[in-house]
Image (spheres, coloured by chain):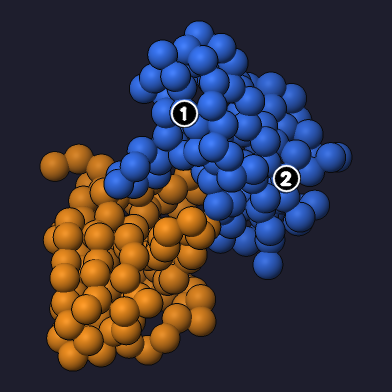
Amino acid sequence: QKEVEQNSGPLSVPEGAIASLNCTYSDRGSQSFFWYRQYSGKSPELIMSIYSNGDKEDGRFTAQLNKASQYVSLLIRDSQPSDSATYLCAVEGPYDYKLSFGAGTTVTVRA
Amino acid sequence: ETGVTQTPRHLVMGMTNKKSLKCEQHLGHNAMYWYKQSAKKPLELMFVYSLEERVENNSVPSRFSPECPNSSHLFLHLHTLQPEDSALYLCASSQDLGGGGSTDTQYFGPGTRLTVL
């Protein structure tokens, strides 16, 4: 069973600041990594996927992966109140289609 | 309709009732999933179907019974549930299963908020 750990938060950041979310995972063979955003009462929405070491940028979001350290992070630049949500880290192994989710980090962007 | 849809969006049922949750995906995907999300807990995978065949039953009690009549539709039949089964039930789909890469990306429906009295 893969374990995925996230700081539960809440993480409070001022508008315009960078929000930094961290995720660690236990299965060294994991190959695919995803960040989902979930607004209160809504379903998870995919915002980033990353498969190789390094950084991947998409608009204000940057995912960072370090497989040696078994660590994946998400940076949200120029945070907006609309970014206030719970962010879920999900990890998939190489021969296992099952996604393991962390419990999520709740982010609050204060105006 | 686009993406993944689920009905009903909210359901209240007694412990002796029988009800069904419906999921439909309009993405041409081959794999479909049921998840349970309880407050403050990680999403729990319940069932996985690939090309209409069940490939995973993640130790789910028999009071939950899935059905996948075709690759676009997935049902979750509920009977004699317990109050601790109250949760958000999420359906998801992906192009394929396994192997890593973008075809495994799962897309979620809006969920059914289930309350068992």
User: Residue drawn at (34%, 42%), measured in percent from left and top?
Assistant: A40
Quarter of the image with the C terminus of chain B in it = bottom left
**Mark 2 or 1, nearer chain start:** 2
Quadrant position of residue A51:
top right
Helix, strand or loop under label 2: strand
Q: Residue A82 versus residue B98: which sits nearer the camera?
A: A82
**Tag 1: amino acid:** Thr
Quadrant position of residue B91:
bottom left
The mark found on residue A9 in the picture is none
Residue B3: give x, y in percent of width and height: 25, 43
What's the chain of the residue with tag 2?
A: A
What's the chain of the residue with tag 1?
A: A
Residue B37: give x, y in percent of width and height: 41, 60
Residue B99: give x, y in percent of width and height: 61, 52
User: Residue drawn at (76%, 56%), measured in percent from left and top?
Assistant: A27
Q: Residue B34 versus residue B8: which sits nearer the camera?
A: B8
Query: Can residue A63 be seen in this snapshot?
Result: no
- Write down which chain is painted orange: B
User: Residue drawn at (76%, 55%), measured in percent from left and top?
Assistant: A26
The mark found on residue A108 in the picture is 1
Helix, strand or loop under label 1: strand
**Tag 2: amino acid:** Thr
Quadrant position of residue A12:
top right
Q: Colour of chain A?
A: blue
Name the residue carrying label 2: A24
Q: Residues within 10 Å of mark 2 (few under 14, many from 20)?
A: many
Residue B40: give x, y in percent of width and height: 48, 56
User: Residue drawn at (64%, 45%), measured in percent from left and top?
Assistant: A6
Is B89 above or below relative to B60? above
